[in-house]
């Protein structure tokens, strides 16, 4: 055995070892048994397995017996049926802390041309892709790229423009410890957490379906002031029996992936909330059933068992949603930079702008343009991939608990 030594100054001579071949048990152990006999340090190491093929990269300081070590590693790799490349150089990896970003791509499907376009924009911004990890394969393919050396605003703008031209969603977020920190996730309800609009369902029971739906569509596009549109629609419900609210609650259908999203966020000790332009008579029941931490919505006035066509209490409109996000964040002791807002309509714009990460979910064009990123597929749990949570981690936790 050689006595262990430590380099006194940098840069020092280093060796980059790249091992490739069909994966099998004992590869890493066998190679490091050889390295252990030399007075060297391990500076970096990364391994990936794709469809049973191993790629292992190890960066070590180089010993005086560099040629001897390379020869021994080559023999050890051959005995394992692997190939190894040894490249001598100097120094460690360049620092990657400055400008570190996570770029997440989601596609259904994700095509080579999409990846090429995103990689080209990253390169065009003078940045480098340091690492790529697949987060999911089904029902959506998602990749997370660790990128260094980019201006986040420029990269986000260019990638957002490119994503809008393609059937792919792209998010750019800063790297660092914040990604593992406690978050508050606030969702719109109608057409986000659940399918459809509850006021449209009530309008159908009141015999005013077409007129309510017309006003709803105009408000969601931003063509009509939301507060005025809400009052006009609620007026059309006057005289409806209050039991209709129970009927609508029973009909509520969660968006695919909603239960998985909430269950996973809660397991990770994040806080989850809903804020809705709909009605507390429905959202409070939904929040209790799903175990949500906070909820805010409008309240329909009921007199003698019938809807009066008026609201009581503060109005949860565009500004009200942003105010609710602030209140929830303060109660949860989560900074606004750690909040995520998810919505689809114009009345979600203020909270999407306020949140650390604003997500347009199957949203109107005006919302997509304003949000940090968009998700264009029907699965709400795709939001988890934007937070760096992989499908394998979700499934493993579900299997363990189940």
Image (tube, grey):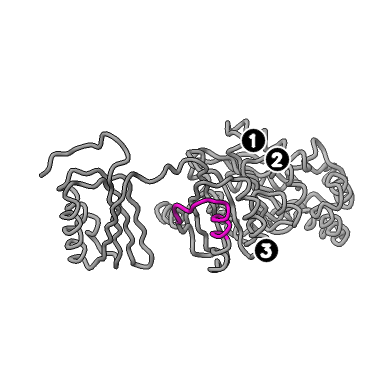
First along the sequence among labels 2 and 3 = 3
Q: Which mark identifies residue 243?
A: none
- Look at discs 3 and 1 and give the one toward the viewer: 3
Q: Secondary structure at mark 1?
A: helix
Q: Mark 1, residues whose alpha carbon is within 10 Å: few (<14), some, or many (≥20)?
A: many
Q: Which mark identifies residue 165?
A: 3
Q: Which residue is mark 2?
A: 296
- Look at discs 2 and 3 and give the one toward the viewer: 3
The CA distance from mark 1 to mark 2 is 10 Å
Who is closer to the viewer here, 170 or 139? 170
Q: Secondary structure at mark 3?
A: loop
Position of residue 67 measured from the top left corner of the image (x, y, whole percent): 18, 55
Q: Which residue is mark 1?
A: 328
**CB under 8 Å between discs 1 and 2:** yes
First along the sequence among labels 1 and 2 = 2
In the picture, which quadrant includes the N terminus?
A: top left
First along the sequence among labels 3 and 1 = 3
For the view shown, which residue lies furthest in the left direction?
1
Q: Mark 2, residues whose alpha carbon is within 10 Å: few (<14), some, or many (≥20)?
A: many
- Look at discs 1 and 2 and give the one toward the viewer: 1
**CB under 8 Å between discs 3 and 1:** no
Q: Which residues are magenta?
A: 118-132
Who is closer to the viewer here, 218 or 96? 96
Position of residue 63 measured from the top left corner of the image (x, y, whole percent): 20, 46
Who is closer to the viewer here, 36 or 278? 36
At horizontal 87% and vertical 43% (from top left) the residue drawn is: 310
Position of residue 378 measured from the top left corner of the image (x, y, whole percent): 63, 62
The CA distance from mark 3 to mark 1 is 35 Å
Position of residue 389 measured from the top left corner of the image (x, y, whole percent): 49, 51
């Amino acid at each position: 055995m050689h006595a262990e030594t430590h380099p006194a100054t940098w840069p020092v001579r280093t060796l980059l070892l790249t091992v490739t071949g069909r994966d099998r048990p004992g590869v890493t152990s066998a190679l490091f048994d050889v390295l252990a006999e030399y007075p060297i340090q391990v500076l970096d190491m990364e391994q990936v397995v794709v469809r049973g093929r191993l790629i292992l990269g190890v960066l070590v300081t180089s010993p005086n017996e560099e040629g001897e070590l390379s020869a021994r590693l080559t023999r050890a790799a051959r005995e394992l049926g692997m190939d190894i490349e040894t490249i001598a150089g100097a120094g460690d990896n360049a620092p990657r802390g400055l400008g570190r970003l996570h770029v997440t791509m989601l596609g259904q499907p994700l095509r080579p041309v999409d990846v090429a376009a995103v990689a080209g924009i990253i390169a065009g911004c003078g940045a480098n892709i340091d690492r790529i990890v697949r987060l999911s394969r089904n029902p959506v393919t998602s990749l997370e790229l660790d990128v260094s050396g980019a201006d986040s605003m420029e990269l986000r703008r260019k990638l957002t423009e490119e994503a809008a031209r393609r059937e792919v969603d792209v998010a750019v977020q800063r790297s660092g410890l914040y990604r593992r920190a406690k978050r508050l996730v606030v969702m719109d309800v109608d057409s986000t957490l659940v399918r459809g609009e509850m006021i449209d369902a009530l309008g159908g029971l009141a015999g005013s379906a077409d007129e309510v739906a017309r006003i709803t569509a105009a408000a969601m596009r931003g063509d009509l002031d939301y507060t005025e549109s809400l009052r006009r629609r609620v007026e059309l419900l006057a005289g409806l029996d209050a039991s209709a609210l129970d009927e609508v609650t029973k009909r509520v259908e969660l968006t695919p992936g909603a239960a998985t999203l909430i269950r996973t966020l809660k397991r990770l000790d994040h806080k989850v909330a809903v804020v809705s332009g709909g009605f507390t008579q429905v959202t409070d029941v939904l929040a209790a059933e799903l175990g949500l931490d906070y909820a805010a919505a409008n309240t329909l006035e009921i007199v003698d068992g019938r809807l009066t066509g008026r609201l009581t209490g503060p109005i949860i409109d565009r500004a009200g949603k942003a105010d609710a996000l602030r209140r929830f964040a303060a109660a949860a002791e989560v900074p606004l930079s750690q909040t995520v807002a998810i919505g689809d309509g114009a009345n979600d714009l203020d909270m999407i702008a306020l949140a650390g990460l604003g997500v347009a979910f199957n949203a109107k064009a005006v919302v997509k343009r304003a949000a940090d990123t968009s998700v264009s597929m029907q699965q709400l749990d795709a939001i988890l991939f934007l937070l760096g949570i992989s499908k394998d981690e979700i499934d493993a936790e579900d299997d363990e608990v189940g």
